C-alpha cells in the first residue's frame, strides 16, 4: 500500500512536469522568431490581439484573428491550415498562450509562440507595420 501511494504521487508529479514542459516547448524569443520569419517563407503569422492593437503596429504579413472572438478557431481555419507552420503573438504572451492551446486542441501541429509578444518585439527594435 505504501509503494502504491508513492507511485501515485510520483506519477502525478511526472504528469504535471510533462504538461508544464509541453506548455513551454513552443515558446521562442525575439531573435529566434526574427530568424524564423526571415528563413521560412511558408510561415504564417497570427496576431490574436484586438483590431485596435493591430492598427497600432503589427508584424508584417500577420493575419489578425482576435482570440476573444467566439468562433476564434473557425476564423483561423479560414486562412491558416492546421499543417502550416504558425507564429502566434499578442501584446505580452497571455492571449497567445490561450490561442496556442485552443489551436493545438483543434489539430494545429506546427505552432510557435512569440515569448513576450509585441512588447518584447518592439523593445528589441524589430520592424512593425502600421
Image (cartoon, rainbow, N blue to C red):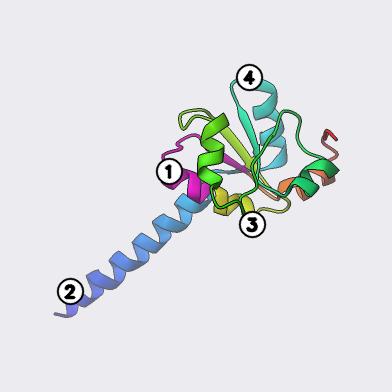
Instruction: Name the residue at the left extreme.
Output: 1
Vertical side of 48 occupied by 82: above or below: above
- Are dots 4 and 1 in contact, CB under 8 Å? no
**Secondary-structure class at tag 4:** loop
Q: Which residue is drawn at the image coordinates 66% and 53% (left, top)?
A: 93
Precedes in sequence: disc 3 or disc 2: 2
Above or below for 66 versus 18: above
**Residue contact between numbered discs 1 and 3, judged by CB atoms under 8 Å:** no
Query: Given contact means CB atoms under 8 Å apart, are the residues at marks 3 and 4 in contact?
Result: no
Q: CA distance from mark 1 to mark 3?
A: 19 Å
Total marks drawn?
A: 4
Q: Residue 106 got which mark?
A: 1
Q: Which residues are magenta?
A: 100-113
User: Dot 3 corresponds to which residue?
Assistant: 94
Tag 3 secondary structure: helix
Q: Kindly identify which residue carries mark 4.
A: 41
Residue 50, given in percent of the width and then of the height, sits at: 72, 49
Pick whichever of labels 3 and 4 is earlier in the sequence: 4
Does 101 lie within the magenta span?
yes
Could you give the CA–CA distance between mark 4 and mark 1, rounded to whole angstroms?
A: 24 Å
Toward the bottom, the furthest residue is: 2
Residue at screen point 57% across, 30% down = 79
Which sits earlier in the primary sequence, circle 1 or circle 3?
3
Location of mark 2 (residue): 4
Q: Do the residues bearing badges 1 and 2 touch, measured as CB atoms within 8 Å? A: no
Secondary structure under tag 2 reads: helix
Q: What secondary structure is found at the residue carrying circle 1? A: loop
Dot 2, how many residues are within 10 Å of its Cα: few (below 14), some (14-19), or many (20+)? few
Of the 4 image quadrants, the one containing the N terminus is: bottom left
| Of the pair 72 and 113, the residue shown nearer to us | 72
Query: Relative to 95, is 13 on the left or the right?
Result: left
Amino acid at each position: 500500500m505504501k509503494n502504491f501511494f508513492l507511485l501515485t504521487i510520483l506519477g502525478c508529479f511526472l504528469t504535471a512536469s510533462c504538461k508544464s514542459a509541453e506548455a513551454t516547448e513552443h515558446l521562442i524569443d525575439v531573435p529566434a522568431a526574427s530568424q524564423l520569419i526571415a528563413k521560412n517563407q511558408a510561415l504564417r503569422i497570427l496576431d490574436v490581439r484586438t483590431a485596435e492593437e493591430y492598427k497600432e503596429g503589427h508584424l508584417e504579413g500577420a493575419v489578425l484573428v482576435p482570440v476573444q472572438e467566439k468562433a476564434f478557431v473557425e476564423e483561423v481555419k479560414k486562412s491558416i491550415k492546421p499543417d502550416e507552420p504558425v507564429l502566434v503573438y499578442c501584446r505580452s504572451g497571455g492571449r497567445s498562450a490561450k490561442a496556442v492551446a485552443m489551436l493545438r486542441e483543434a489539430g494545429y501541429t506546427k505552432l510557435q509562440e512569440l515569448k513576450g509578444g509585441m512588447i518584447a518585439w518592439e523593445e528589441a527594435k524589430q520592424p512593425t507595420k502600421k
